[in-house]
Amino acid sequence: MNLDFSEEQEMLRTSARDFLTKECPKTLVRELEEDEKGYSPELWRKMAELGWMGLVLPEEYDGMGMEFMDLIVLLEEMGRNILPGPFFCTVVLGGLTILNGGTEEQKKEFLPKVANGEMILTMALTEPSATYEASGVKTKAVAKDDAFVINGTKLFVENAHIADYLVCVTRTSDGASPEEGITLFLVDAKSPGIKCEVMPTIGADKLCEVVFEDVSVPRQNMLGKLDRGWPIVARTLEQATVAKCAEMIGSAQAALEMTLAYVKERVQYGRPIGSFQVVQHYCANMWINVDTGKSILYEAAWRVGEGLPASKEVAVAKGWINEVYKFVAERGVQCHGAIGTTRDHDMGLYYRRAMAAELAFGDTDCQREVVARQIGL
Amino acid sequence: MDFKLTPEQESLRKEFEDFFKKALKEAPPGWVAGLETMFSEEGWAFHRSLARQLGKKGWLSRPWPKEYGGQAASIIEQLLFNEVRGYYGAPGVDVFGVGMLAPTLLLWGTEEQKQQHLPPIAKAEIMWCQCWSEPNAGSDLASLTTRAVKDGDEYVINGQKIWTSGAHRADWSFILARTDPEQPRHRGLSYFLVDMKNPGVTVRPLISMEGSHLYNEVFFDDVRVPKQNMVAEENQGWYVTLMTMNFERSGVAGMMEAKRTLEELVEFCKETRRDGEVLARNPFIRHRLAQMAIEIEVGRAMSYRVAWLQEKGEMAAAEACAAKVYGSELGQRLSYLGCQIMGLYGQVKRSKWAPLMGRFESAYQIALGMNIAAGTSEIMRNIIAIRGLELPREPRA
């Protein structure tokens, strides 16, 4: 057992923190909330130069071949700064899915472009039914000659408006269970018949509605096997859920630190409010939450990285960290007083995203249901 | 980062598993872990028998240095021991003698004190209690007023202690008494080892609301203690009480007790029908049990982290406090959940009507004490805030 990060991981953390503090100040975060694209191509290029997009991709695809835990470290730092843009969907939802389920040809075609920052990917999974379960996939793909024709509506698709390719999860047949009959396609976002519209959301994080109307996709763009794509999605969801947890813990840690700094300096009744026991206990509770969140995050991430069965641990982590982030953001606002509720204050950036992050990849109730099944209920 | 155990650690855990699984077959019917049950008539007999077996195997002294009969077990090994022991709800480890006094003596004791007291602790021949709290010195322990006055080669102790767990069962006690009232509060205290059979020691029971006898008042009337029973120098008592590093204090045992309890609750819900439906199908119950499972898994992960920090030689004071407060508050929620799931039966004491031997009816009451004993939840949060988060101290009146 060794529960420390490696020296390389500590270095990655430090350099990512320095880089993001400098290159992604909160002024940029706010600017990009209003921006149509929602990301900074210049910052994207710099991140690519640092090798971040290829961090966990194998070296043969121009990646750095690092471990899943390295990605967790990086995502924590991104969450700390609430880095806007398509990193998560490109690397986790797109890159890892291709790595998990793609043919050698597909990997060679797509992954180097991801690693070099030349391609933005995302996954089109959820639909108006708003569930991550296979049963929610109604978008149909029908074989026609050497292609498949996709029809349907995807919702909550991250950064589809700027994506070059979408990993589209479709239903190709009705199997005995909802998980059967699912097929994945790599769809060129510029294909005729695709309409994309950004949804106004609490995190201003460019979730999109994507309508597929007779969108033709060549057969060779199928990712994985016909009708048997769900296990690839399931693997990605497991990775994405724990990756999201890392972002959330990074954010919660930042919200906590911001609050601690504030209560040490804000004076009322002639003394810092952080010297009042009630405020101290709020802070202690916030810290306990973040600390317990880290403990379960790293264990779940380790299991996922090792390829061990992790359904329970991942659901436990997300179910817990959903509540941790919301709790810390809410108490953070309370400790800041009225200023914390304003548009101008950074605490609101976190508070809003705490809700968005909970909903991504399964809210707490969803995770509880997974855990319920895992403990034999 | 790597959560894997070494093959040696795996096989050690297996050894603990085999032992405790078998040992718990001798438990009294409806046995539930806890100090309240341990100090009962049948609980105490079970505890002593198990303690002797553990002593014989050398497991009570595993963390001690080899020269005192230990095996210098690492924190992680202790974690595994406590994890397994906690899961099976096994008594057999004197929390005061094994858990507190032995590490204290190893650090502060004279050679003579070590030779006299360590072997009987290791063999489970002598059981200890801790006489610290007083009626007017609870969280503010350093304000205690029990006096120890030097008289030749002896000290004469007068005063009253309270909340002394198991004083009615203990052979010996370690006590804090004031030796110099002129010194500032923390600096006038000394640490003594007192034979409970000494003339002048009176133990009076304090019965808990659910009926168990855990706590006591202990009165010291002109109790004479030889000066060689003082641990460390005169007036150094406070510093002796500060936690020692080399004993695992991650709270893992409590978390594993909770895990086992939850498993039993899950089984109950799978077997019990209400309104024509199995409880396990009820979405409200499913989610509440799942939430508890989430909290227990998180707590276990947390205790591993505390142990790891300790293994590395870090104080981890804030983390240990977090684990304590997290664990006791979780235990309370679990007891409430259990009662509610039992429905009307949740109020029934152990009897033919009580599901699961009425364990949640008593847990509902017992859980309260855990938020108070060994540092209240408020004190734990104060320590986290001041030491962990470096918030400014509250001005004292």
Image: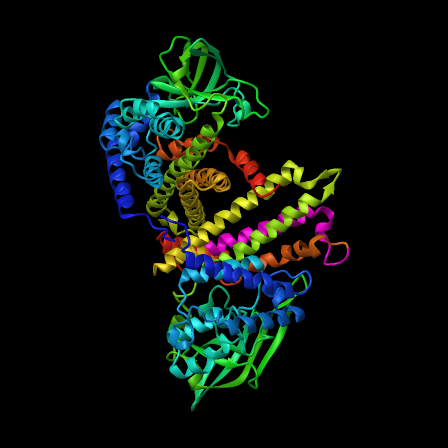
Q: Which residues are magenta?
A: B323-352
Q: Position of residue B296 (x, y in %)?
A: 52, 49
What residue is shown at x 43% (from left), y 57% (from top)?
B320
- Number of numbered tags placed on the structure image: 0
Front one among B75 and B97: B75
Image position of A69 (left or right of B59): left
Instruction: Please state if A280 lies on the left or on the right of A50 as rendered.
Output: right
Q: Is residue B107 left or right of residue B171?
A: left
Residue name at image x 52 percent, y 44 percent: B294
Residue B238 image offset from top left, x and y in percent: 40, 71
Q: Nearer the viewer, residue B190 or A36?
A: A36
The quarter of the displayed image where residue A48 is located: top left
- Find the residue positioned furthest to the right: B352
Seen as rendered, the residue at the extreme bottom is B152
Magenta stretch, main secondary structure class: helix
x, y percentage for residue A232? Answer: 45, 29
Q: Magenta stretch: residue B330 in it?
A: yes
Task: Tell me which residue sits at (38%, 78%) in the image.
Answer: B232
Please state, as top left, top right, bottom left or bottom right, where the C terminus of chain B lies in the image: bottom left
Left or right: B315 as drawn, with respect to B20: left
Q: Compared with residue B324, is residue B113 higher up or lower down, i.e. above or below?
A: below
Q: Is residue B394 visible?
A: no
* Protein image colouring: rainbow
A332 versus A145 height, above or below: below
- Provide residue A333's location: percent of width, then percent of height: 42, 38
B279 falls in the magenta region: no
